[in-house]
Image: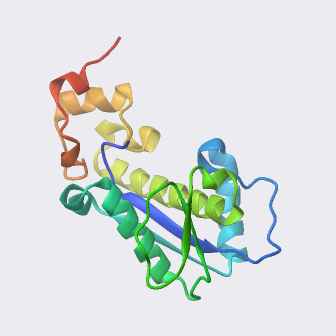
């Protein structure tokens, strides 16, 4: 997982007839395709919500609970209440009285989950690019807070920032560089 930055969650309600041949799991899409899809989803969705959960909250309640909190807050942003919630993954906590299904790898199966994954990824990437302006030495414009060799070297050299997730308890052996 990421060593720095928020966890970002999105909720999307698409029209029943929505189709897009590019739309897929955001991790399987190129940056270019995600950037093409983002405005299409924003315009064609019935409604959507995107939420960042900050590192203090992640460190306080753990990454799973922070992700679920983000999902709930994204659902709260929807201008229309969903009839049923499709969740990517295997964990979720009841939201209001709305029924839900957890679907492992659901972003490769359901358009609405794929659309939410695209929005969450593009919004988080944009957030990390802004943080890069404040801390360019961590190269977040490229690594987006993931534990790349470049990022781990920067942590070794400069230490942690207020945007690093302290609950991951980075230890010396986790920062070892295999070069």
Q: With 96 as the anchor, is 165 left or right in this view?
A: left
Q: How is the image coloured?
A: rainbow
Q: How many marks?
A: 0
Against 35, residue 158 (above or below) is above
In this view of the protein, which residue sits in the foreground, 31 or 27? 27
Q: With 60 as the anchor, is 80 left or right in this view?
A: right
Instruction: Report the residue at 43% width, 61% height from top.
Output: 8
In this view of the protein, which residue sits in the foreground, 9 or 125? 9
In this view of the protein, which residue sits in the foreground, 134 or 15? 15
| Position in image of residue 22 (x %, y %) | 77, 53
| Position in image of residue 29 (x %, y %) | 66, 45
| Image quadrant assignment for residue 55 | bottom left
| Image quadrant assignment for residue 92 | bottom left
Against 18, residue 104 (above or below) is above
Instruction: Report the residue at 19% width, 28% height from top.
Output: 157
Instruction: Report the residue at 42% width, 44% height from top.
Output: 144
Quarter that holds the N terminus:
top left
Against 146, residue 92 (above or below) is below
Instruction: Report the residue at 67% width, 47% height from top.
Output: 32
Quarter that holds the C terminus:
top left
Q: With 161 as the anchor, is 35 left or right in this view?
A: right
């Amino acid at each position: 997982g990421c060593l720095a930055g928020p966890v970002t969650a999105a909720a999307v309600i698409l029209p029943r007839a929505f189709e897009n041949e590019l739309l897929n799991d955001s991790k399987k899409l190129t940056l270019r395709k995600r950037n093409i899809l983002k405005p299409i989803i924003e315009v064609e969705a019935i409604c959507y919500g995107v939420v960042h959960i900050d590192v203090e909250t992640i460190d306080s309640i753990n990454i799973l609970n922070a992700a679920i909190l983000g999902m709930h807050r994204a659902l709260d942003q929807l201008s229309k209440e969903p009839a049923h919630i499709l969740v990517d993954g295997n964990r979720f906590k009841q939201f209001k009285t709305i029924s839900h299904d957890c679907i492992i790898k659901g972003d490769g199966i359901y358009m609405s989950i794929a659309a939410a994954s695209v929005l969450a990824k593009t919004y988080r990437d944009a957030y990390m690019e802004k943080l890069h302006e404040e801390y360019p030495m961590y190269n977040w414009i490229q690594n987006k807070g993931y534990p790349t060799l470049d990022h781990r070297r920067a942590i070794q050299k400069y230490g942690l920032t207020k945007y690093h997730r302290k609950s991951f308890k980075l230890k010396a052996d986790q920062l070892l560089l295999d070069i």
